[in-house]
Image: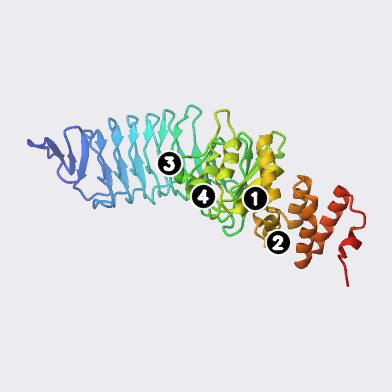
């Protein structure tokens, strides 16, 4: 190393130069002037300053550091994007600052002392960590702390460790995924990795998940989630305009809710294509838990009156009638009246494949309309004619049978001359 002893004091700012280390009056290391890549910090250091060993500040070549007892903080970006492979931290350490080890690709493991209380935003993001053992007294894991740590295979929480975990803390940690592509940290769904991105996804969220991280599904075209009726909390901002971006923003995404027996008791489809942003987000905002827990079906039903596109109104009405969980009689009647008044448009949408969003065949949709008493007697002949014109005799036959059973038409084949040569 350089000189064995070289203490001097700058009387203007009381900065101390100890060998190759520049330390301010509070004991914060503000610069390193040496060239060694394996460094033992002197005992006068009480904190590592912002960017001291970062690549941006010109000393990213550091590979090994021993930090002395007495150091309580590693400040923002201290080792950001450096070549650090190994670091020994003192028991006195309390705070690891924002982006402190971000981008340290060669850092495979680190032992964080039990005294550390806070790990700030992006602290280990983009690093090469493979395993992390969290300290017992940890109170907070910052926003995107381990963001995109693709090599991370194991996260160990001591039983005494119950920190607050900020949004996206483990987003992008694909190495932590289970057999279903879910990255679950304790009771939080932090990330999702799909086998395919271009096909509709069906994701079953386990009962033990209490919180769903932000922007997990927005890159996929269509996602169908299944979760408990007492649905997990979702990240929602006061600003309603970001709901769609942070949760599910693509037309056709659905959420099914299973009861305690595992049966689907309720379903909602976020059929929002072409609507005003505010209206779209009203539907999605229903995901916010009610005070008593669960999806806010009442708020979802209210959003129906703000929809402008007939196709969207039709889809919402059909699904709510098919799965009438917490559906009031008043809203049941309003949905029924709407569908009856728009029945020709509904049928045209079915034949034009515009209701494929329901995930059902058109004959299945027809049977739902029959079951829910949407079809009036006087409209059936026109619907049958429309079906025949489009070469759908299967549809016409279904309507004829329904007409016969419900309204007592005796000889429907002869009356309508369905198979006229």
Q: Which label's residue is closer to the chain start, 4 or 1? A: 4
Decide which of 297, 301 is in the foreground and name it: 301
- Residue 239: give its label: 3
Residue 88, label in figure: none
Residue 169 vertical placement versus 135 (above, below): below
Residue in the picture at 77% in, 54% down: 379
- What is the x, y in percent for residue 98? 33, 41
Relative side of 120 to 299, left or right: left
- Residue in the image at 40% along x and 46% along y: 125
Q: Secondary structure at mark 1?
A: helix
Q: Report which residue position mark 1 lands on.
A: 315
Whole-number angstrom distance, CA of label 2 to CA of label 3: 39 Å
Give the label, 4 or 1, closer to the camera.
1
Q: Quadrant of residue 255?
A: top right
Tag 4, which secondary structure? helix
Give the alpha-carbon distance from disc 1 to disc 2, as whole Å: 14 Å
Which corner quadrant of the image does residue 95 belong to?
top left
**Dot in front, 1 or 3:** 1
Badge 3 marks a residue whose secondary structure is loop
């Amino acid at each position: 190393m350089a000189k064995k002893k070289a203490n001097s004091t700058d009387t203007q700012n009381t900065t101390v130069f100890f060998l190759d280390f520049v330390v301010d009056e509070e004991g914060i290391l503000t610069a390193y002037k040496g060239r060694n890549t394996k460094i033992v910090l002197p005992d006068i250091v009480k904190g590592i300053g912002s960017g001291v060993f970062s690549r941006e500040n010109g000393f990213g070549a550091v590979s090994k550091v021993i930090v002395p007892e007495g150091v309580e903080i590693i400040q923002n970006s201290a080792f950001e994007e450096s070549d650090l492979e190994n670091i020994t931290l003192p028991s006195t350490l309390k705070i690891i600052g924002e982006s402190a080890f971000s981008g340290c690709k060669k850092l495979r493991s680190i032992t964080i002392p039990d005294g550390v209380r806070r790990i700030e935003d992006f602290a280990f993001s983009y690093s090469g960590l493979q395993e992390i053992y969290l300290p017992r007294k940890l109170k907070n894991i910052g926003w995107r702390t381990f963001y995109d740590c693709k090599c991370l295979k194991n996260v160990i929480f001591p039983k005494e460790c119950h920190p607050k975990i900020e949004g996206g803390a483990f987003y992008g940690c694909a190495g932590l995924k289970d057999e279903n592509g879910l990255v679950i940290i304790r009771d939080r769904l932090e990330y999702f990795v799909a086998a395919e991105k271009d096909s509709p996804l069906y994701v079953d969220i386990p009962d033990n998940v209490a919180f769903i991280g932000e922007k997990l599904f927005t890159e996929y075209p269509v996602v169908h989630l299944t979760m408990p009726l007492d649905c997990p909390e979702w990240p929602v901002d006061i600003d309603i305009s970001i709901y769609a971006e942070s949760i599910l923003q693509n037309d056709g995404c659905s959420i099914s809710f299973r009861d305690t027996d595992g049966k689907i008791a309720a379903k909602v489809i976020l059929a929002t294509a072409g609507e005003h942003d505010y209206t779209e987000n009203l539907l999605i905002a229903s995901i916010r838990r009610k005070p008593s827990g669960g999806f806010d079906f009442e708020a979802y039903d209210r959003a129906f009156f703000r929809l402008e596109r007939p196709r969207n109104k039709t889809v919402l009405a059909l699904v709510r009638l098919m799965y009438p969980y917490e559906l009031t009689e008043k809203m049941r009647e309003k949905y029924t009246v709407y569908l009856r008044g728009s029945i020709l448009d509904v049928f045209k949408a079915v034949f034009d494949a515009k209701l494929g969003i329901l995930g059902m065949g058109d004959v299945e949709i027809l049977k739902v309309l029959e079951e829910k008493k949407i079809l009036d007697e006087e409209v059936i002949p026109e619907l049958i004619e429309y079906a025949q014109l489009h070469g759908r005799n299967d549809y016409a036959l279904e309507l004829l049978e329904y007409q016969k059973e419900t309204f007592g038409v005796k000889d429907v084949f002869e009356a309508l001359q369905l198979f006229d040569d």
